[in-house]
Image: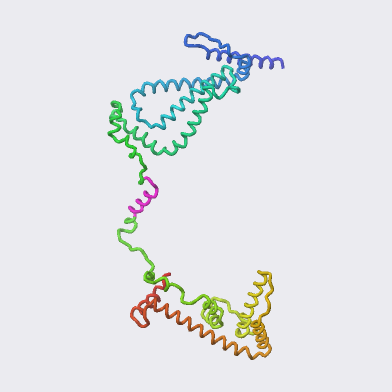
Amino acid sequence: MTKKANANSNTKKQSVDEAQEFLDSLLLDDNQTKQIQPEISSQLSATAVADSPVLLKSLASLTAGIKATKLKLDELKHQIPSLPTSFGVSLLELKLHSLLSYLTSLSFFILMKLQGKSTANTSPTTPCISKLVELRVVLEKIRPIEAKLKYQIDKVLKAATECEKVTAHGETRAPISEVDLGASGILDPLQFRPNPKNFVGAAAAEKSTNDAPTELGGVYRPPRITPLKYTGDISASAKKPSLSTSTRDSLSKSRLFRDMRETFDTTRPEQVTSHGTGYGVREMRDTRDEELEKIQEFELNNYQRLGATRDRNKREKAAMRRAAGGGGGIMDEMENLETDFLRMEEVDRAVGKDDREKYGAAGSVLSKRNARAEEMFGTGG
């Protein structure tokens, strides 16, 4: 245990000595004269000694970065006077100057921390702190503007790069003046507008147009158009249905219409009554049941009981007599059949009117031609 404790103490003492030596080297001026700062407190020294391994690593990387940056800045310092910078991109100039000022203020802030000065109670009016806040806001506001102008900025930078006149041996000629830039059109803002040919849709359309003759073999193929009936001369009144809504409803409920639908529409299931005939009782019960359903629906919706009227009593008594006698149903069925045929006359007149508007007068050449065209090609709707 004693040897292990002695080893740990020796390692700690060595780290403390290295940290102290490194801190002393940072406080040397150009004449290698040691200037001990009296502002460094004992608490800061103890903290630096405790974190000496991490501090040594961070300071070493920071020193290497500063040296590399200084060399790069020295190169740029000699190149900047020979470059035309008065007509540059103002947004980039503002961004770079703001970033440089931000780093300068940040360096002063770090110096305050190294000297042991607390910034917790520092007033916002301190030049260093207030400048950092101001520059941070400017940099945050520049970011969305730079994203919107990225396309124009990229084109300007590309044009500036291409304007460097390089000889075949790789030797750069004399620097380009601003007059040369203006003559080449780089200073024209309309030169950097978006190019519609760069859109994906335009490129795809141009490619499909170029490939079309190759795919079709150079032979013109007309488009396939479905034949349609011309309805441009038909007025709005002629387009309206010839039958009223009430007539359509009554026809859909008639026995004759149901018989025709069951005869020609083979896809529908057949409806058969308990008597097995399919006539008479079903039609009489349909009208009566429909009336009772309407009365029941009205009473349920309005919470009101409807009284029996004279006409309703007559219909109820007639239905009871027909059910009791058994012979009146045939006469009623014949009356219903006569009513259905009268309604079919209205349908016939409506169909004839539609045929005249659609095909022309009956027996004419135009009527026959249109009828044959519809049989061959259909209505086209």
Total numbered badges shown on the rendered structure: 0
Magenta-drawn stretch, dominant element (helix, strand or loop) = helix
- Residue under the point 45% across and 22% down: 69
Left or right of 255 in this view: 90: left
Left or right of 295 in this view: 100: left
Considering only vertical position in the picture, is 321 above or below 156?
below
The x, y position of residue 123, in whole percent, is 57, 23
Considering only vertical position in the picture, is 196 above or below 228?
above
The x, y position of residue 106, in whole percent, is 51, 23
- Residue under the point 68% across and 79% down: 308
- Residue under the point 31% across and 30% down: 164
Highlighted magenta segment, given as a residue range = 198-211
The image quarter in which residue 215 lies: bottom left
Q: Nearer the viewer, residue 52 or 174?
A: 174
Evaluate whether residue 11 shows in this view.
Answer: no
The x, y position of residue 370, in whole percent, is 37, 76
Q: Is residue 344 magenta?
A: no
- Identify the colour scheme used: rainbow
Considering only vertical position in the picture, is 101 above or below 140?
above
Q: Nearer the viewer, residue 140 or 371?
A: 140
